[in-house]
Image: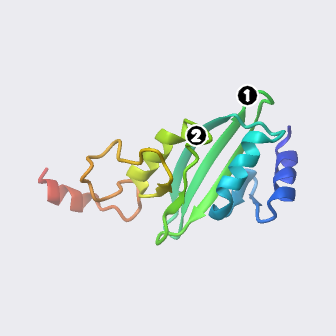
């Protein structure tokens, strides 16, 4: 299925969905993430694979980027959710796609995004008592070096 057709189906069901620029990513409000996930996995779209989740710190917002793939229909979709720096909470997709478990842990550890209802949200790269999130733009490496005395 062509990306424009996928977007049209999403737009019919979720009027708040928008398409971002020439890349064709679909932007949805965080409040609709679970509803969109249910639609993507159970509809004629059959997105059975959550290929990747990553985050981008744009200073004024954190973008969560979800890349879905349908092994059956052989089409893909990029979905983005924007979070404000003062509210980094979003629902987990681990109950839909098992791969979300590790992707969400990594984003939690490196960006500080909390995934509600995640089965085991904890740091996986930094120590449990670590306070910072090293891929955030406000992370200061020099502060870290002073604290650790390297």
Task: Identify the residue position indicated by label 2 in the image.
Answer: 52
**Crowding near the residue tagged with mark 2, few <14, some 14–19, many ≥20 C-alpha atoms within 10 Å:** some
Farthest-out residue, left:
149
> Is the residue 73 above or below the residue 21 in the image?
above
Q: Is residue 91 left or right of residue 147?
A: right
Q: Is residue 39 left or right of residue 8?
A: left
Choose between 132 and 87: the one closer to the eye.
Answer: 87
> Is the residue 121 above or below the residue 131 in the image?
above
| Residue drawn at x 57%, y 58% as measured from the top left | 63
Label 2 vs label 1: CA separation?
14 Å
How far across and down, in percent of the image, does residue 130 sit?
A: 26, 54
Q: Is residue 56 left or right of residue 140?
A: right
Tag of residue 71 = 1
The image quadrant of residue 111 is bottom left
| Residue drawn at x 22%, y 62% as measured from the top left | 143
* Tag 2 secondary structure: strand
* Tag 1 secondary structure: loop
Number of numbered callouts drawn:
2
> Is the residue 126 above or below the residue 27 in the image?
above
How far across and down, in percent of the image, does residue 147 sit?
A: 16, 59
């Amino acid at each position: 299925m062509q990306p424009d057709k996928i977007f049209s189906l999403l737009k019919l069901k979720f009027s708040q969905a928008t398409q971002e620029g020439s890349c064709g990513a679909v932007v949805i409000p965080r409040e609709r993430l679970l509803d969109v996930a249910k639609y993507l996995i159970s509809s004629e779209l059959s997105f059975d694979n959550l290929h990747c989740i990553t985050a981008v710190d744009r200073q004024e917002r954190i973008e969560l980027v979800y890349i879905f793939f349908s092994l059956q229909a052989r089409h893909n979709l990029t979905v983005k959710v924007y979070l404000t720096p003062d509210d980094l909470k979003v629902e987990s997709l681990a109950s839909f796609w098992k791969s979300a478990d590790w992707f969400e842990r990594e984003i939690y550890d490196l960006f500080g995004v909390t995934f509600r209802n995640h089965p085991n949200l904890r740091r996986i790269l930094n120590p449990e008592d670590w306070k910072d999130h090293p891929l955030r733009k406000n992370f200061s490496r020099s502060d870290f070096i002073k604290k650790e005395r390297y």
